Image (tube, rainbow, N blue to C red):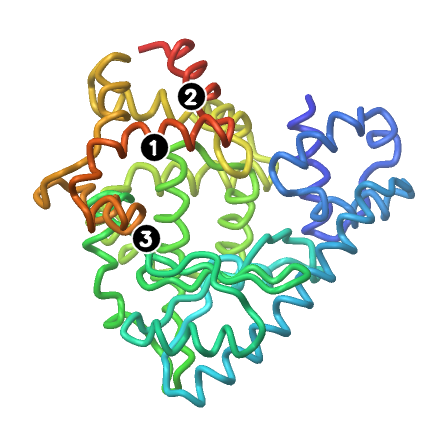
């Protein structure tokens, strides 16, 4: 019932219609708030509650905070893009930077960062530009994106590639040389509507098949498909190449039926249950279950795989480990200590207990 209430308020908000006041009065708004918080939809439903005459500071403040955060980061982003243009560095806004504009009210789409793809050959130049604008490099040269932060809220992820090797071979190889798909005469680039939709779906698929993804992702798909008319023959052909044709079709069908008020199929309901249980950032339980199911092995093999580290360049995970733990791979005599270092770091962050419990509770 809580999910139904949240979806109802979301639909009213994005359609800018007033909810039925009696229906809202009968809702457990505490439960709605908790679920909306898990799915980053608190600011999204705020206009609907206001239209229903409901005064709840938790929702209204969330919208104001989201508005101010987005204003701050978008202002910083415009300055950055101007600097990148002047330096002759091509760049492209990703995901939420684009998707926020398909929501009817600025700030309705809650966002914690700005994702930008750029010419990876100019990473050092980009770092100099970012630091010149007052950002600090929180992470540089590790993984497929560099992380920069500037007080009070500006968190920028500057992507060297759209996907790292850890996302899976097909996704990584498909997007490894994405430059050929970019459009735009200047240094600011964009994808065609079809390729943008495919990328957003591929990003969602990566999270869905790893630890899960939430209702906001479904809402993004619904609103985007409502706004643009895509060449679905092209979409379906490319989704096959990406190895996500089944997911794309099921995800699209669920998004359109859920937010347009159509009756859900049994397959829809099963997928929705997984999405709702995942929250915006997935769960450790889903991560463990999915990893065990994907590898086709039991819990013991999963634990062994988690403890081991790749030592051969032929291992598909070698590159990711090498950039994440550069000291250990620069001085290979330290590699036997890496499993223990990773375990201790997970314990300090509180992840070790969470994963241990998830392994214990896993069905496989």
* Residue mark closest to the camera, 1 vs 2: 1
Q: Is residue 364 left or right of residue 109?
A: left
Residue contact between numbered discs 1 and 2, judged by CB atoms under 8 Å:
no
Q: Quadrant of residue 123?
A: bottom left
- Give the camera-side residue of 79 and 245: 79
184 versus 114 height, above or below: below
Local crowd size for mark 1, using a 10 Å CA cut-off: few (<14), some (14–19), many (≥20):
few
Of helix, strand and loop, which one carries label 3? loop
Q: Are marks 3 and 1 in contact (CB under 8 Å)?
A: no
Report the residue marked by disc 3. 143
Identify the residue at image location x=60%, y=53%.
111
Return the x and y of residue 30 as percentages of the image width and height. 79, 27
Q: Earlier in the sequence, mark 3 or mark 1?
A: 3
Residue with the mark numbered 2: 355
The residue located at (48%, 33%) in the rendering is 282
Real-space Cα distance between discs 1 and 2? Answer: 16 Å
Of the image marks 3 and 2, the number of the one nearer the N terminus:
3
Q: Which residue is mark 1?
A: 341
Q: What is the C-alpha distance between the residues marked 3 and 2?
A: 22 Å
Which comes sooner in the sequence, label 1 or label 2? 1
Q: Secondary structure at mark 1?
A: helix
């Amino acid at each position: 019932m809580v999910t139904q209430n949240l979806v109802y308020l979301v639909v009213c908000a994005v359609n800018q219609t007033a909810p039925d006041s009696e229906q809202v009065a009968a809702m457990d708004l505490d439960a709605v708030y908790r679920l909306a918080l898990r799915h980053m939809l608190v600011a999204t439903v705020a206009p609907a509650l206001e239209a229903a005459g409901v005064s709840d500071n938790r929702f209204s403040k969330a919208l104001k905070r989201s508005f101010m955060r987005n204003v701050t980061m978008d202002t910083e982003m415009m300055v950055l893009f101007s600097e990148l243009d002047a330096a002759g560095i091509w760049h492209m806004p990703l995901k939420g930077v684009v998707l926020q504009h398909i929501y009817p009210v600025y700030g309705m789409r809650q966002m914690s960062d700005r994702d930008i793809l750029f010419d990876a050959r100019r990473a050092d130049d980009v770092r100099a530009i970012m630091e010149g604008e007052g950002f600090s490099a929180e992470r540089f040269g590790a993984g497929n994106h560099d992380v920069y932060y500037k007080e009070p809220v500006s968190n920028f992820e500057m992507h060297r590639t759209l996907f790292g090797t850890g996302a899976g071979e097909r996704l990584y190889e498909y997007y490894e040389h994405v430059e050929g798909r970019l459009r735009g005469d200047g240094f600011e680039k964009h994808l065609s509507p079809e390729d943008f939709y495919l990328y957003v779906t591929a990003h969602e698929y990566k999270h869905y098949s790893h630890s899960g993804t939430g209702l906001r992702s479904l809402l993004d798909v619904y609103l985007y498909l409502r706004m643009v008319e895509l060449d679905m023959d092209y979409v379906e052909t490319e989704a096959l190449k990406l190895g996500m044709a089944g997911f794309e079709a099921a995800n699209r069908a669920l998004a359109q039926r859920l937010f347009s008020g159509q009756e859900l199929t049994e397959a829809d309901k099963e997928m929705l249950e997984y999405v709702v249980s995942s929250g915006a950032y997935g769960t450790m339980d889903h991560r463990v279950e999915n990893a065990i199911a994907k590898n086709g092995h039991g819990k013991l093999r999963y634990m062994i795989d988690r403890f081991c580290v790749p030592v051969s360049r032929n291992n598909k995970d070698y590159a990711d480990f090498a950039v994440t733990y550069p000291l250990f791979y620069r001085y290979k005599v330290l590699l036997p200590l890496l499993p223990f270092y990773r375990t201790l770091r997970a314990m300090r962050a509180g992840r070790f207990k969470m994963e241990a419990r998830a392994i214990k509770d896993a069905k496989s």
